[in-house]
């Protein structure tokens, strides 16, 4: 008998954090409200000292919630700050270089836009997960491509490397991506800018993901 599918939220920080202590308290409540697999620290642009300060503050909170703390773009800082992993894009250096820097014990995720070919290459070269997107219009990042959700289905059917669906994802629209085969759905503005508040958004994501999985049997 096949094991039931799982899908969880992959949470990105806002592009800027003005008050680290205030944000840390908010994140703690969000982690308690939702079902979150990972928190990616994505601050653009930010000085190394600013990144270090927020990682130091958030790390115990994220790990206490049994989620992974992922750093965007910077394998060097991910290793130095003892993050659980790093996420790189197509312009952030090679997978081999990132792996050499962070070692074998840390997670390595790779953005593959709308390309299954890039994703296959990433998997073959040692990525622990791949990210496809932007599936919807995003206020957080300009996306070079808009993939069809079918790419998640094909990926889920042909490989065991997890996939993350990213780009403009909200609790209202994530169901289609879950049903298509995403192992995680990523959100930033869909949580932090939700009119009902981040905690309510995290709960809504949890409910929407569960409903989509249940509908798929």
Image: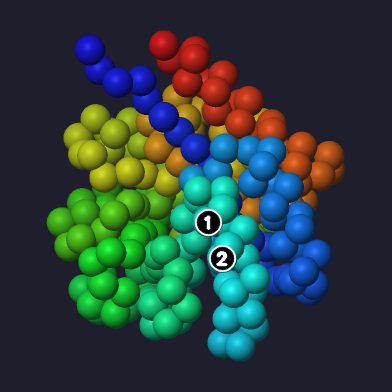
Task: Answer above or below: position of 76 versus 213.
Answer: below
State yes or no: discs 2 and 1 in contact (Cβ < 8 Å).
yes
Q: Which of the image's four quarters has the N terminus?
A: top left
Q: How crowded is mark 2: few (under 14 residues within 10 Å), some or many (20 or more)?
A: many
Query: In the picture provided, is 55 more to the left or to the right than 90?
Result: right
Task: Give the spatial CA distance, label 2 vs label 1.
Answer: 6 Å
* Whole-percent x, y for residue 175 in the image: 55, 27
Q: Residue at x 20, y 35 (%)?
A: 158
Query: In the picture provided, is 32 more to the left or to the right than 150?
Result: right
> Which element type, helix, strand or loop, lies under badge 2?
helix
* Whole-percent x, y for residue 56 in the image: 59, 74
- Residue 71 appears in the rendering: yes
Residue 146's tag is: none
> Which element type, helix, strand or loop, lies under badge 1?
helix
Q: Residues within 10 Å of mark 1 (few under 14, many from 20)?
A: some
- Residue 45 appears in the rendering: no
Image-quadrant location for residue 106: bottom left
Please give the residue where the numbered disc 1 appears in the rendered image. Answer: 63
The image's colour scheme reads rainbow
Task: Answer above or below: position of 183 versus 54.
Answer: above
Seen from the viewer's position, the closer of residues 114 and 194 is: 194
Q: Which residue is drawn at 63% across and 38% down?
A: 34
Please give the residue where the numbered disc 2 appears in the rendered image. Answer: 59
Q: Which residue is drawn at 36% across and 44% down?
A: 163
Query: In the picture provided, is 58 more to the left or to the right than 5?
Result: right
Q: Which residue is drawn at 73% across and 47% down?
A: 29
Figure label count: 2
Image-quadrant location for residue 105: bottom left
Seen from the viewer's position, the closer of residues 7 and 106 is: 106
Task: Answer above or below: position of 210 versus 58.
Answer: above
* Whole-percent x, y for residue 217 in the image: 41, 11
Image-quadrant location for residue 42: bottom right
């Amino acid at each position: 008998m096949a094991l039931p599918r799982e899908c969880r939220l992959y949470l990105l920080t806002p592009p800027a954090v003005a008050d680290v202590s205030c944000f840390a308290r908010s994140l703690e409540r969000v982690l308690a409200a939702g079902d979150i697999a990972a928190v990616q620290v994505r601050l653009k642009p930010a000085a190394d000292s600013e990144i270090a300060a927020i990682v130091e503050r958030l790390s115990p909170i994220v790990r206490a919630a049994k989620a992974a703390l992922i750093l965007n773009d910077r394998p060097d800082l991910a290793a130095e700050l003892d993050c659980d992993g790093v996420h790189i894009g197509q312009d952030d250096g090679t997978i081999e270089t990132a792996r050499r820097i962070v070692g074998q014990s840390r997670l390595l995720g790779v953005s593959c836009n709308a390309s299954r070919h890039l994703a296959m290459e990433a998997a073959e070269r040692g990525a622990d997960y791949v990210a496809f997107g932007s599936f919807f219009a995003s206020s957080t990042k300009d996306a070079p491509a808009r993939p069809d959700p079918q790419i998640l289905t094909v990926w889920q059917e042909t490989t065991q490397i997890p996939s993350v669906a990213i780009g403009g994802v909200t609790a209202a629209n994530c169901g289609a991506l879950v049903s298509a085969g995403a192992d995680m759905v990523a959100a930033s503005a869909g949580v932090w800018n939700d009119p009902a508040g981040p905690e309510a958004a995290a709960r809504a994501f949890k409910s929407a993901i569960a409903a989509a999985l249940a509908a798929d049997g």
